[in-house]
Image (cartoon, rainbow, N blue to C red):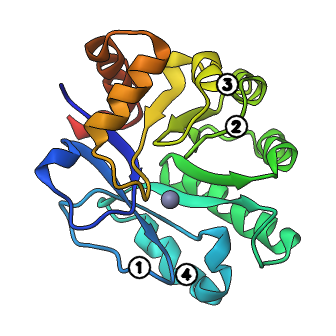
Amino acid sequence: MIYCDIHTHRLPLKDSDGRFVLLNRIFGKDELLPAPVRQSLGIHPWYIKEAAGKERLLSEYLGKPSVWAIGEAGLDKGAEAPFPLQEKVFREQAEWAEEKGKPLIIHCVRAWSELLAARKALHPRQTWIVHGFRGKAELAAQLSAQGLWLSFGERFQTAALKAADPQRLLVETDESLLPIALIYHRLALALETEEADFAAQVLRNYTGLFPNIL
Ligand SMILES: [Zn+2]
């Protein structure tokens, strides 16, 4: 089985992590690693201060081939940074995603209507992926209907997993200590589907998102 992890912070990367892993780096906090490590890079809403004034450098980094996605960028009602500033920083990153032609990985906490409003205003062509989705079924269905992709990890609601569009579904470890294989196992069990079928679907989604990865 081929495992795909759209979002992890775990280092060092191990063979058991799977073949397709996107290591997330928080700009202003983490260093970008050299190729061939595949990474996502962006300004996390908790680290806006650390990134301030370095936007030009970030934009340059985002163009590098080792950066496969922008993010995690986001909106978080619990973060210290003022919300309007978060919205500005998020918009900027969404625009970079368009400019660089790379998907956007999103961290969203209690700001779903604002996220959907931003999507309506920006009309992105790039894929927007909500990572670590733990919301309810209704929200999963609503986001799926708006074209957003959802990534599930260690903690999730079964009804939400079932409500998500299978063709816009991804898997992640994020900060979890569980092996990616165990997360796949739990998700397939919750979906009452064969693990191999589930893994094949996620692989199709992942490689569809990153056709150059194969
Ligand atoms: Zn994360």
Question: Dot 1, how many residues are within 10 Å of its Cα: few (below 14), some (14-19), or many (20+)?
Answer: few
Residue 212 seen by the camera:
no
In three-dimensional space, the C-alpha distance between marks 2 and 3, rounded to whole angstroms, equals: 12 Å
Question: Dot 3, how many residues are within 10 Å of its Cα: few (below 14), some (14-19), or many (20+)?
Answer: some
| Label 2 beta carbon less than 8 Å to ligand 1 | no
In three-dimensional space, the C-alpha distance between marks 1 and 2, rounded to whole angstroms, equals: 28 Å
- Which picture quadrant has residue 150? top right
Q: Which of marks 3 and 4 is nearer the N terminus?
A: 4
Image position, residue 14 (x, y; %): 15, 56
Residue type (three-letter) at the residue carrying disc 3:
Ser
Q: Are marks 2 and 4 in contact (CB under 8 Å)?
A: no
Q: Mark 2 points at which residue?
A: 135
Residue type (three-letter) at the residue carrying disc 1:
Asp
Locate the N terminus by quadrant: top left
In the image, what residue occupies the spot 34% across and 75% down? 32
Above/below status of 144 relative to 84:
above
137 displayed left or right of 182: right
Q: Which of marks 2 and 4 is nearer the N terminus?
A: 4
Q: Name the residue under label 4.
A: 56
In the image, what residue occupies the spot 63% across and 40% down? 134
Above/below status of 210 relative to 185:
below
Depth check, front residue: 122 or 1: 1
Image position, residue 67 (x, y; %): 37, 60
Q: Mark 3 points at which residue?
A: 144
- Secondary element under disc 1, as helix, strand or loop, is loop
Q: Name the residue under label 1.
A: 30
Depth check, front residue: 154 or 88: 154
Q: Which of marks 2 and 3 is nearer the N terminus?
A: 2
